[in-house]
Amino acid sequence: MIIELNTAILSNRCNYERTGNLGEGEIILAIATLNSHIDTAIQLQERINSAYIVFGKTSAWADEENPPEENDKITEISEIVGYKKLKQFSLARPLKAGEDENNVGYPVVTYNSQKWVLVPKNKAYEEEARWLYAEAEIQPNEFPLGRYRQVGLHLGLTPRTGVSKHNLLPADVQDKGILHFYENREPQNRTSSVYVLEQFMIKV
């Protein structure tokens, strides 16, 4: 799924000449500029060193084929299996119509059957890269095997002192940081022969 951050701005306009029929002090929504979205995406991407995919929820849903809707008030997913440091956390934009992915000049990835261009930070404004692509690889031998049903993205995570590996069990984590995004899914079964590539595309 593509996650979209809502960055609407509250505006308290008191000038009647500018607000027409709006009452004094009435709150309306102003428009965030494209550059503000890109700036926010850059700030998030710069936290790559503390960015980890988290996965869990080993117990079954009430209806396994219809997971419940996500709740924006939760602070962590259920029954955490582990955290995996991101392999890729890049600014991105969609591949444009008529562009050749072999000659675009930057890496191209596929997400949900769509091509995306991964853009370096110094080209973010020029390329209008307001998306973030997050990717982590989960190997069979890195975590306990079995089914999981929730996947999320933590920023600001700190491992315990002396822990340098990229695959962290809950006991390896000193500070989980903030769960920024997550999704509920139908069961995904990790077995000894299953390699998992977890991906998020975030529109800022």
Image (tube, grey):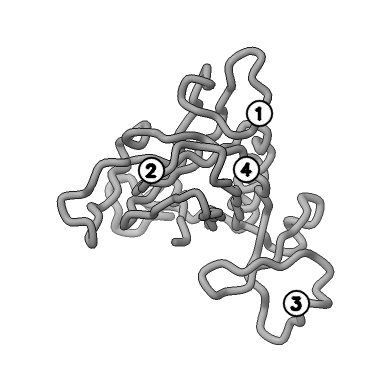
Helix, strand or loop under label 1: loop
User: In front: mark 2 or mark 1?
Assistant: 1
Q: Report the mark closest to the observer, 2 or 4.
A: 4
| Disc 2/disc 4 C-alpha distance (Å) | 46 Å
Label located before the other in sequence (1 or 3): 3
Instruction: Give the residue drawn at x 75%, y 77%.
Output: 101
- Name the kind of residue labelled 4 in the image: Leu
Q: Quadrant of the N terminus?
A: bottom left
Identity of the amino acid at label 2? Cys
Residue 44 can be seen, yes or no = yes
Mark 2 and mark 1: Cα distance apart in space:
55 Å
Give the x, y percent position of residue 195: 55, 54
Q: Which residue is mark 1?
A: 165
Give residue 14's mark. 2
- The first of marks 4 and 1 along the sequence is 4
Q: Which residue ends up furthest to the top in the rendered image?
A: 161
Amino acid type of the residue that numbered disc 1 sits on in the rendered structure: Lys
Q: Residues within 10 Å of mark 2 (few under 14, many from 20)?
A: some
